[in-house]
Image (cartoon, rainbow, N blue to C red):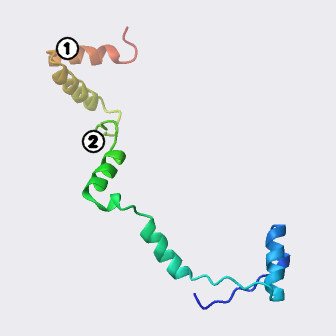
Amino acid sequence: MADEEIKPNPEQATTQEAQLAAENIAAGKEKVTNVDFDADYAAAQQMSVSDVDRTEAGAQAAQEATAPQFEVSQQEETQTEATTGNPDDYKQMAQDSVAESGTEVSDDLIKKAMDKGKAGNS
């Protein structure tokens, strides 16, 4: 890439100064600046990290600067089951719910609740 010759075109210049410089280079009044992109890129990489950042103290400072400021809780995985409309499924769900709450519910109580929930019962 360093061997590529740049030929200025005064008509493509975006400012009056750029146009003047392009005309002077085309007329031979000024030299074309020789740019070695690969060398410039390598130099920029060297300058992109300061001397302090290359030390343990710099690494520690970077770690502290980028550390999260708030604790993020971990999400819990839950499983959901599709409901079928089957009363036995709801009976099991009610028993599971009661077991979690610690309240005692008998089969008779569940049967009475299901009977009351049927259409036509008030």
Of the 4 image quadrants, the one containing the C terminus is: top left
Tag nearer the camera, 2 or 1: 2
Tag 2 and tag 1, C-beta contact below 8 Å: no
The residue singled out by tag 2 in the image is 77
**Nearest the eye: 11 or 101:** 11
Locate the N terminus and report the quarter of the image it occupies: bottom right
Q: Position of residue 16 (x, y in %)?
A: 84, 68
The residue type indicated by label 1 comes to: Leu
Q: Nearer the viewer, residue 122 or 24?
A: 24
Could you give the CA–CA distance between mark 2 and mark 1, rounded to whole angstroms? 33 Å
Amino acid identity at mark 2:
Glu
13 to 112, vertically: above or below: below
Figure quadrant of residue 92:
top left
Q: From what the image shows, is residue 72 above or below residue 102?
A: below
Seen in the picture, residue 34 relative to 116 is either above or below; the reply is: below
The structure residue drawn at horizontal position 68% and vertical position 89%, both measured from the top left corner, is: 5
Q: Residue at x 58, y 88 (%)?
A: 2
Q: Secondary structure at mark 1?
A: helix
In the rendered image, which residue does mark 1 sit on? 109
Which type of secondary structure does the marked residue at label 2 adopt? loop
